[in-house]
Image (cartoon, helix red, strand yellow):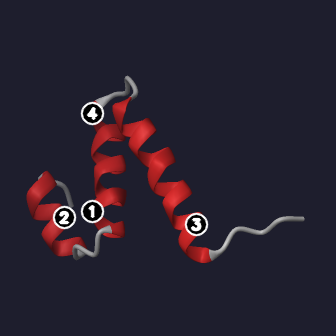
Amino acid sequence: MNKLQPQEDMEKEKTLLECFIKSDMDAREFKRAIAVRMTMAGQSYNEISKILGVS
């Protein structure tokens, strides 16, 4: 079994997330995906909730 290195795994997840964000989805799923991307970029939950207008 070829296990990906943590950095390679993270890059793969980022690519999948970007594809998901670009796909057609409802607003709740879009905000959820954006929140995940922002979390991966290091933003705090408090900051993300203010930007996206969610709790």
* CB within 8 Å, label 4 to label 2: no
Q: Is residue 46 left or right of residue 29?
A: left
Dividing the picture into quadrants, the one containing residue 29 is top left
The earlier-in-sequence mark between 4 and 3 is 3
> Which element type, helix, strand or loop, lies under badge 2?
helix
Between tags 4 and 3, which lies in front? 3
- x, y percent for residue 24: 37, 23
Dividing the picture into quadrants, the one containing residue 27 is top left
Q: Is residue 15 left or right of residue 4?
A: left
Task: Establish if 52 lies above or below 43.
Answer: above
Q: Which residue is mark 1?
A: 38
**Which mark identifies residue 48?**
2
34 or 45: which is nearer to us? Answer: 34
> Which element type, helix, strand or loop, lies under badge 4?
helix
Between tags 1 and 3, which lies in front? 3
Q: Which residue is mark 3?
A: 8
- x, y percent for residue 4: 70, 68
